[in-house]
Amino acid sequence: MEELAECIGVVSDEARAEMTRAWQNPNNRYNPLNRFATKSQKLELLRRDNWCCRVPGCPNRVWLHLHHIEPYSRGGPTTRENLLNLCCGCHQNHHRGLLKID
């Protein structure tokens, strides 16, 4: 049950403080005009999302892809607020129109 709580975003105060410090690292500053996130940014996004797919109820922790909530092709920025980790299955379902992400 704890793993499920971690996957759906329940994070301890200590972990949240550590993530805040990590986001203040100059290597993790985002350039919204870049198409792709850097390795250090990807690592911090994986930590933020507890190393699992962000779709509620999806337990996958492998083959994670970064996804722009507002598509980059439509002007969506590459920022931590606009990026989330999806497993390859959920990512394909979203692009096929079978999964809606708000």
Image: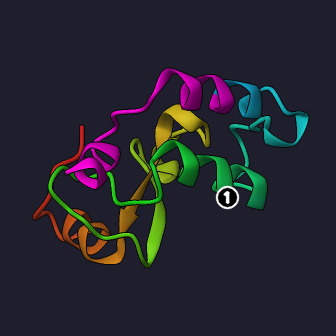
Where residue 18 appears, as percent x and y from the top left, is: 67, 30
Up-down relation of residue 98 to residue 62 (above or below)? above
Residue range in magenta is 1-19
Where residue 47 appears, as percent x and y from the top left, is: 56, 49
Q: Disc 1 designates what residue? A: 36
Please state if 93 lies on the left or on the right of 47 as rendered.
left
- Residue drawn at x 67%, y 58% as measured from the top left: 36
In front of the other: 80 or 97: 80
Type of the residue with mark 1: Phe
Where residue 15 appears, as percent x and y from the top left, is: 56, 32
Up-down relation of residue 79 to residue 101 (above or below)? above
Please state if 25 lies on the left or on the right of 61 as rendered.
right
Indicate the quadrant containing the C terminus: top left, top right, bottom left or bottom right.
top left
Residue 49 magenta: no
- Residue drawn at x 57%, y 25% as measured from the top left: 14
How crowded is the residue under tag 1: few (<14 C-alpha within 10 Å), some, or many (20+)?
Answer: some
In front of the other: 37 or 48: 48
Decide whether the magenta segment is chiefly helix, strand or loop.
helix
- Residue drawn at x 87%, y 42% as measured from the top left: 27
Residue extending furthest right? Answer: 26
Please state if 37 lies on the left or on the right of 47 as rendered.
right
Where residue 96 appears, as percent x and y from the top left, is: 18, 71
In front of the other: 40 or 2: 2
Residue 2 magenta: yes
For numbered disc 1, what is the local secondary structure? loop
Q: Quadrant of residue 79?
A: top right
Up-down relation of residue 53 to residue 50 (above or below)? below
- Residue drawn at x 79%, y 26% as measured from the top left: 24
